[in-house]
Image (tube, coloured by chain):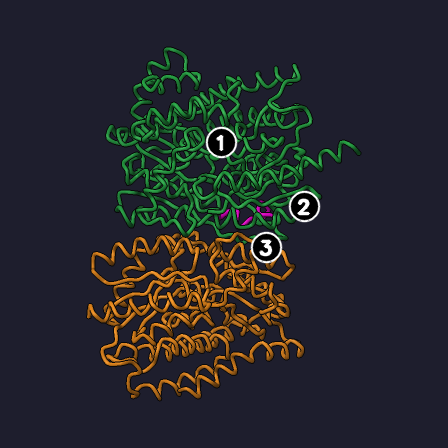
Amino acid sequence: MKEILQGLDKLSSARPLELAKKKKEGKKIVEFFGDYVPEQWINAAGAESYLICKGGDPQPPEATLDYMLRFMNPLAATMAGSYLLGLDAVMPIADSVVIQQHDCHYGRMSEILEYKGLPVFKVGVPADYTVGISQEYYRQELREFREKLEELVGHPISDDAIRANYAKTNQINELLRKIDELRKQDNSPITFSDFIRLNHYTLRVDYDTSIEALTKIYAELKNAPGVHKDGAPRILIMGRAVALGDYIVPSIIENAGGSIVCEFLDEAIRPFRNDISTEGDVIDAYAAAMYDNKVPQCIFQPAWDTRYVNLQKLIEEYRIDGILWYQLAFDEIYDMEYTCLSKWLGETKTPIMKLETSYEYSREAMAPLTTRLESFVESIKEAK
Amino acid sequence: MANDANRELLKLAAFDDEELEAFLPRWKKTAEKLKLTDEIIDFSVNTYIPENWDIKYLGVRKMLGAYLRELADICSTPELKEQGVKIVYGILPAIANYYYAAKNAGGDKIFIGFPDLMLVNTLNSFFHSAAPFLFEAEKYGFTYGCRHCPLNKMRVAAYVTGTIAAPDLIWSWGFNCDEGPKTDEMIQGITGKQWKYHVSRVPHDSRFDENEDMMETRLKFMCDQMKLGVEAISEATGFAISDEDMIAANKDTGRIGFKVGMLTNLATTADPPVLGGEVLTMMQQVLTVPFNTGFSYMEEAIDILTKEIKACIKKGEGVMPKGTPRVGFYNVPFCVPWVGKFFRDNGVIISFSHALTLSKRQMSASKYPDDPWMSAAETWSRNGMCMNLNGETTSIIEKIEACHPDGMILGFFDFDRWLGAQQKIIAKLVQDRIGLPSYYIEADFWDDRDYSPESLKTRIESVCQIINMRKAQESEN
């Protein structure tokens, strides 16, 4: 598996260069953010897609401080800060930067990019996702996005091409679900660090490469031994995102003897539990899968009751011993959800630890961070 | 001294003898509930209010009275609810007309108000005493370090301390921020489902090259959201809100809006300056925050103050010398009124607030004269605070050109990821586009616990030095 991951890593890293070449060949480049922007359509249009999902570095958020309030979450700020620092190789050559507008952090960070003159296109995502008029509004936003794409590439997008891409991402999802299922074993054959990386690679490389790699990895893992010590505490990580590049905290947990076997994350992860129907209207199929019927993101409303029910299901299925609440600094809505969840979990006596990150992993910050995480793992071990 | 503190407060707030005697027992109960001790009230009457508010005007004192009456009403919601009165709350920002229309429909059988705003506003503007509630909310999980909104903290704290009743419905507008509506979900999460809410959400999806009031699909969505909100109120209270109720509410707010507009125009153009922007903003607020006590107390205050201001202008009198430089604010921090005093101490007066001053576009004719719902959505979309950053900057510049400030102060919204996030760029754009000195100050409009007066004083001194120098240079030229 190591070799496959290394291969994917190389391809993933080389993606900006590949896009620059394709741009020269006349291809349109669409950089985008969020699950509510259908990447399958961008690819079906014959354009090249590139997801914004980097995090884990404190410098990009700092670069936004000349423009924006200090109290913005570092992941959203990374989107704009990476551009400001010249660290996003794709954004300057993108023909369109499409950003879902589902919360204020991304809304305002998108405006830095507009202020800098980038060709930003917005897809509105109303937070009250159970309301009929909001479901229709999102569909209308998708229709406008499709028109925008067609205008960009200069030809209509075929529904069949979209459905073919749905089928491919469904196949990727299925393979990820199979690998994920292995994590329910007493000793998971894959670490979370590898699982999330693998997930990120599938967001970067083309569908067929992902399918081929995931097929091989599953074949290798299905009879592989566990990678953790027997009896390692089983941990679920929950929060907005473990972004591409933000791998330090999971590594510390794993080095301390913890086994993160499940995640409940809203962004920067392939939504592998949600397949899209390849039948019927392609807009409706996407909206139904990703908006109407998906476990709501934290920002949606109402969300937290439903999310708690889903969390309990995951706790049971993955036999979770403790939860790591991984919160981005100044992410106010997640902070509020934590207040409710910790109260409810307290009633079930499930241990939960809140860890806030501003992507500050300097030497000074690492020692106390490591101590805290080690103590958390130890405390769960003892409770076991 | 202490025994008469409450009485002295009501006298200061221009209650006449009969009114005072009738209101005093209610006020004492209110003060007790809000932990406003005699010492606090005594300090307010003799120091805090005189230092920070232009109480030489009867109209300003009447305005104080209007807020005290409203505060008493809010604190009596637990008793009102027991008596069968339906309780309807809302949050800022929203269109107050719908709540006034609900009041028109239900009369005394319905209570309307934005309790968090009224509590933070009145407690901090006049008593500097909201902090105990904010600390209480932090104990309940509204963590200190995450920079949450003090209004939302107050909503939680006021409810868990029994200061306000659970609403039959809170209609939370989420057209701007995320945290406001999510607070109701949080209150349910920590206290239970008796806290009933309805949310309306619209995403921020307009681009720099789009005008929100021209985006038909978005306007229609917004107006449908408003319809659902009004239906939810009718369902929760049993009072159907008729077109007549809505028309009457629109008529009332139109009348007050006109009067406030006149007053604003008088005050912002008078030289010497006759009034600080804090008072104007507090009076404008009756248009955006529903008062359960109605318009009459504030309208009386506005009428009296307008006459007083006209008289001052005629005599050439003011609260600062002729030629005093003026600054406009994104929104005048009237809950931290000592900020205004710092400006005055440094020879500058706060003149107007972008947030509550109407632009020409806001006052222009509707594209939908026959559709009150679309017209309301259009009105909302013409408000600078509800636009994208580019549109809002244009709106601010238009108001600057109408009000002629010598500088603009952005900031004081560090708790808000929508209305506070963009203000640094706006300051840059205003400076770049029209050359007006514009400054961003990181601070909290509602709550001064995080910012020491000394550090703000230094910043304000520096800003005033530059504005004064520039004004002096302009005079020489």
Task: Report which colour depicts chain A.
Answer: orange
Q: Rounded to the nearest whole Å, what is the CA distance between mark 1 and mark 2?
A: 28 Å
In the rendered image, residues at marks 1 and 2 fall on the same chain: yes
Disc 1 target residue: B285
- SS under mark 2: helix
Q: Amino acid at mark 1?
A: Gln
- Amino acid at the residue labelled 3: Asp
For residue B418, above or below residue A194 = above
Q: Residue furthest top?
A: B17
Chain B colour in the picture? green
N-terminal of the two: label 1 or label 2? 1
> For the residue marked with disc 2, what is the amino acid?
Gln
Residue B225 in the image: above or below residue A341:
above
Q: Which residues are magenta?
A: B211-221
- Mark 1 and mark 2 in contact? Answer it, CB < 8 Å: no
Tell me the distance, in whole angstroms, between the alpha carbons under discs 1 and 3: 32 Å
Q: Quadrant of the C terminus of chain B?
A: top right
Q: Position of residue B54 (x, y in %)?
A: 53, 23
